Amino acid sequence: MSVFAVAAWLVSDQTFLVGETAVLRAANDLPGWIGSLLRVVMELGTAVPFLTAVGVVAWCTRRDGPSPALAVLLAFVGARLHYVWKEVIERPRPAGLVEGLHLREHARGFGFPSGHTTMACALAAVLHPLLPRRTRWVAWVLALAVGVARMHVGAHWPMDVVGGVALGVAIASAAWMVVGRGYGRRRP
């Protein structure tokens, strides 16, 4: 949560950090075929994959009791609260502020933190202890690709994405703590 707090503090005065525009442009200017893939992956930052994961986890861990599915559900609910932070921080989106930006999506409201990135990283983090060790990296690569996709479509600044990653991980960690199983610990 401290990374999120620092990121929020850095952007709270609505200024843009050195290098943010360059990183945004790099993601925004990715070739079309990469952008097409990113826009598909971007859907992992929405409610449908998260709620699907609740059902899959409930089924796959039914012998372990309700804790794993409850953790995923709590992470979903917590990640949806990113809207509260947007209203508190009030950071504008890049549209209209960066000349030549390719707007591939017309996002409304404030930008910090990236809601799609928050959702995707909360999902990856809450699933992390449930996934086989050798495949965990896949969830994280996909979650981080959601953040790149949000910059590619012109909806977010890089610090919006950093804030989304930090908030998503904090929410998932809290969800595991609430259900009584430490983050990353498995039952014997």
Image (cartoon, helix red, strand yellow):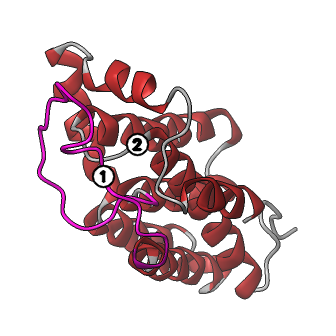
- Residue 52 screen position, x and y as percent: 33, 67
- Residue 76 screen position, x and y as percent: 45, 75
Q: CA distance from mark 1 to mark 2?
A: 7 Å
Residue at coordinates 44% horizontally, 81% vertically from top-left? 84
Of residue 150 and residue 52, the one placed in the foreground of this image is 150
- The quadrant of the image that shows the N terminus is bottom right
User: Measured along the vertical axis of the image, is residue 26 above or below residue 41?
Assistant: above
Report whether 102 appears left or right of 26: left
- Say what secondary structure mark 1 lies in: loop
User: Measured along the vertical axis of the image, is residue 171 above or below residue 7?
Assistant: below
Return the residue at label 1.
Answer: 93
Of residue 30 and residue 142, the one placed in the foreground of this image is 30
Which disc, if any, is residue 114?
none
Report whether 136 appears left or right of 46: right
Q: In the current view of this chain or complex, which residue is farthest to the right? A: 188
- Residue 59, quarter of picture: bottom left
- State the extent of the magenta-drawn residues as a range: 87-113
**Residue 11 visible in rendering:** yes
Q: Amino acid at mark 2?
A: Trp
CB of mark 1 within 8 Å of CB of mark 2? yes
Residue 50 lies in magenta, yes or no?
no
Residue at coordinates 44% horizontally, 73% vertically from top-left? 82
Of residue 91 and residue 40, the one placed in the foreground of this image is 91
Q: Amino acid at mark 1?
A: Arg
Which disc, if any, is residue 157?
2
- Residue 168 screen position, x and y as percent: 56, 62
Residue 89 lies in magenta, yes or no?
yes
- The quadrant of the image that shows the C terminus is bottom right
- Residue 32 screen position, x and y as percent: 14, 17
